Image: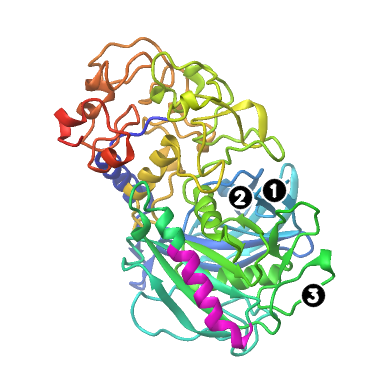
Amino acid sequence: MLIPTRTRLAASLVALLAASCGTGEEPDASGSAVPDEVALDVRIDDATGLTILAIYPLEEWRPLAAGSAPALVYRLEDGGEVVASGQVPDPRIIDPEGGPQVHLSFGTASLRLPARAGELVFLEGARELGRVAFDPSRVARQQDDDDGDGEELPAADGIGRSRSPLLRKGDVRGKPIRAFGTLSKKAGVDLLFLAEGYTENQQDRFRRDARAIARSFRSIYSRQRRYGGRFNIWLQNVRSRSSGIDDPRAHRRADTAFDITFGSGDTPRRCVWFGTAAGEEAARTLGRRTGADVVVILSNTSEYGGCANNGVFVVTHDGEAPWTVAHELGHALLGLADEYEDGECRHDAAPNVAFSSRRGNIPWGGQIGVGVPLPTPESDLYWTTVGAFEGAIYCESGAFRPQLNCLMRELHRGFDRVCLGRLDRYMATLRKNAGGGGSPCTDDMRGDGVCDTCLGDDPDCADGGGADGGGGGDGECGDGTCAEDETDASCPADCGCAASSCGISPFGCYCDPDCTASGDCCADACDACGSC
């Protein structure tokens, strides 16, 4: 996938987001501001149907990259008229690392709707999962400000709107503490760590564990692009009455704040997730109140485990935890797919996966140099080559990844060039004050000249179209398109630094000072930008 320059992309996306996600508020007859749209969290439960957990201002919404789960259809109806409709990944399906998907009976989805009363309906295929009355007048601010003490969460009556039976009076210990990061919530990516399975006397230990994981995680994100400082890390003490978490395989039950439990499978890397809908609701409510982009439940056990879904991770404090968080953010923030073969083979669109080795059908085809064999042999000879390596998204054959290795394939690795470009794009477009901010996979990206495969039907991905040269063809140097037979060396005007604003070029190489240390400078970086 070819990515336009950081400067040009940021400007275009800010304009798009401002047009589609601005406040759009107009005074009503009473003089009060009425929003055009609001955000909401909806719990889907096979036993109880739909429950709206919270309705809040659109600027507090944290849209994340689309997940890989099958989509559910939602509709807002008013007197038989469909006011709005869309799709969200099924939140009842959890993606563990290194194992099959886990299907639960509950899950929470986040979406935006017009501020118009009606009935919200969810469908799984032709089957209706449930419907619930939607009243946008219930909109209420959820998150706390960056400064000020704010009010302590009323744990005695449940937290927020959830009235969770798991959290009792005093279990939520004070306010979240900013452990790392100095950016405002409108300029940084905010991660909230919650204590799970840590007793009253273990809260200091939770903070030590969380700080160590967060410090290492930020270091991982600074190795290639110095992005560690873009993440604000918040710690929230939460008291459990038992140490550790549930483990069905060991016949162990623990009385904890969020009812986190190991899965019962025999795989060494078991899923760790909420045992009840109340636990998930409590964690998400705390995340909303803090204004967090992602909630990380740190479970008090050193045995490896982890799962993620819709902006919530559950991890243990084993030695791999910082890398697990780094990997999971590749899914949540960037819409990246796993690049390894173990698991249930899928065919979900993602920016770092192709299902053909034909250059014109590869999202990053314009970054592949002339003469690179396709498929690309898995040999150290091609260690730094962008190509099409077979084996990705849990498929041994028929699915291709951009480079030989990547953080989305194996821990203790950096991002490959395509995934790194996706991270650059996210950071360049982070504008949280425009409807939730830097998600790289929204309808605003459709038809913008860049092939965004996570959308599923982006016209820029059609053969012969789009600025990424996805359609192939010989092309002419200087026509503004980096065609498949052109490279940064053979045609810098279209593919190199000369075609960019000294950021990432259409060919995928870079022109800024960091490219020297990273080893990914374009051939004309010295002449065009003075960086070499």
Give the residue pinned by disc 1: 123
Residue 371 visible somewhere in the drawing: yes
- Residue 8 in percent (x, y) is at 26, 38
- Residue 383 in percent (x, y) is at 47, 29
Q: Which is more toward the observer, 1 or 490?
A: 490
Q: Residue 253 shows which numbered tag?
A: 3
Q: Is residue 152 left or right of residue 81?
A: left
Magenta stretch in the rendered image:
199-215
The part of the image, by quadrant, that contains residue 27 is: bottom left
Q: Determine the secondary structure under disc 1.
A: strand
Give the number of the mark in front: 1 or 2: 1
Q: Residues within 10 Å of mark 2 (few under 14, many from 20)?
A: many
Residues marked 1 and 2 touching at CB (< 8 Å)? yes
Taking the spot 56% from the left edge, 83% from the top edge, the residue there is 203
Give the residue pinned by disc 2: 75
Q: Determine the secondary structure under disc 2.
A: strand
Residue 201 drawn in magenta: yes
Q: Residues under labels 1 and 3: Cα distance? A: 35 Å
